[in-house]
Image: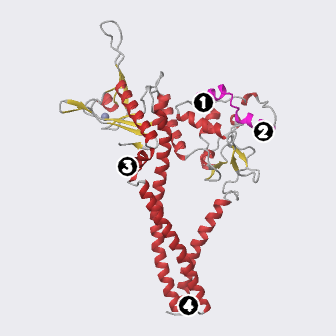
Amino acid sequence: MDTIHKNNEMLVILKNVMNDLYARDTSNKIRAVKHSTFKSGKYVGCYAPIGYLKSPEDKHVFIIAPVTAPVVTRIFDLLCQGYSYRKIATTLNTENVPTPTTFYYMRQGKPNIRKDSDFWAAPTVKASLRNEVYLGHMVQNKTGNLSYKVHKQIVKPESEWIRVENTHEPIISQKTWDLVRELDARNTIFRSGKAGETALFTGVLFCMDCKSPMRRYRDSRKHKDGSYGTYQGYACNRYAAGGKTTCSGHIINQRVLIELLLIDIRFKAALAQNNPIGLKEKIMAQHNAASLERRKTLQATMDALDKRLAELEKLVVTAYEDKVKGVIPEAVCVQLLKWYEDERADKLEQRAKLSAQLEVCQEDEKAADDWLAIIRDYSRLEELDRPTLLRLVKRIEVGERRAVNGHDERDIKIYYNFVGFVEL
Ligand SMILES: [Zn+2]
């Protein structure tokens, strides 16, 4: 091996190490001053959206507004409870919550003279619920993105939007955002359906065998005494539409279903109150066989890896310096660098795998925490209404009845929001 070749090899290894050091260093810097360049999400509008203020240090950056941020959380919460945009707007008006425009004037110390914007309306609510700014992302160039002048704004095609993630502190968690998107979609589908009230379980109930939605089915036959039947149930939609060659009835009584849901919710709520850690462990174990204990082990292994990686980086630099100073011969330096680099590559690979596993654990843990915080309030739930159902439950699958030892049995699986099916 000639000197040039050896030198090159050394430089390549050294460069790898330096690149990693540099990347880590810059990512830390980005975290600290991530708002500093225009393309990385500098805000250029006149007013901050409700829930945020322009930072006094940098008017292109949002900080959470302590006064208005709770209004944003409330809007998201009301939607999670099954409220429509209009009902959220009327609720806020009843509670005399100032509108974004009124808040703006209040900060200026002036009254809101624009009479068209001193009350909440469905479009303002809808705009807030769909604004990714509350997730901590900056989306600009879409409409001027504020709710103050919604009626004057032109919506640009999404391809022209400039979206930069994580530019400021979020007000809404990703899980809540996803839940809202889902409820939004479900509500749109079922509101545009036939007129009249939505059946309690519409959009939530599915046939366990063919996975088709279940449709409401009512018995409105006239009884002998002149009264009408009050039976309400659900049947597999595929069966109802296509007959018994497509699926079977899966018929279930709404009253039975409500009773079952109440029992399951109350039981889980009580557990969430009395033994939250045990319940959380169970949920997480079901999700990816990663209990809290496993997470701790992962984290410890990760810390050890990080420590060794830092050592290796130092060793590489030292070996190179020693060579330059003439303390060690070049051949020794190259050999050392190769060893270090091999070990480093190996450790980096392990680290990447670990970090992916840890991330999954952390997401699951956050979801479990969110769910426990919601469900624990329902230990005395007596009546199941649609908002409560939608808030708690994502999906229910109903199996067909089958005879077991002379009595009927059937499987019913309740999938909760955030955590899915929780087996105890
Ligand atoms: Zn079916």
Q: Residues within 10 Å of mark 3 (few under 14, many from 20)?
A: some
Residue matched to label 3: 286
SS for tag 2? Answer: helix
| Residue 413 painted magenta | no
Give the foreground label among 1 and 3.
3
For residue 1, which numbered disc appears in the image?
A: none
Q: Residue at x 68, y 56 (%)?
A: 35
For residue 107, which numbered disc appears in the image?
A: 2
Stretch of the chain drawn in magenta: 87-108
Disc with the residue nearer the chain's start (3 vs 4): 4
Looking at the rendered structure, the kind of residue marked 1 is Ile
Relative image position of residue 96 (x, y in whole percent): 69, 28
Disc with the residue nearer the chain's start (3 vs 2): 2
Give the foreground label among 4 and 2.
2
Question: Would you identify the image quadrant in which residue 104 lies?
Answer: top right
In terms of depth relative to the viewer, which is nearer, 246 or 207? 207
Q: CA distance from mark 1 to mark 4?
A: 72 Å
Q: CA distance from mark 1 to mark 3?
A: 36 Å
Magenta stretch secondary structure, dominant: helix
Disc 2 within 8 angstroms of ligand 1 (CB) = no
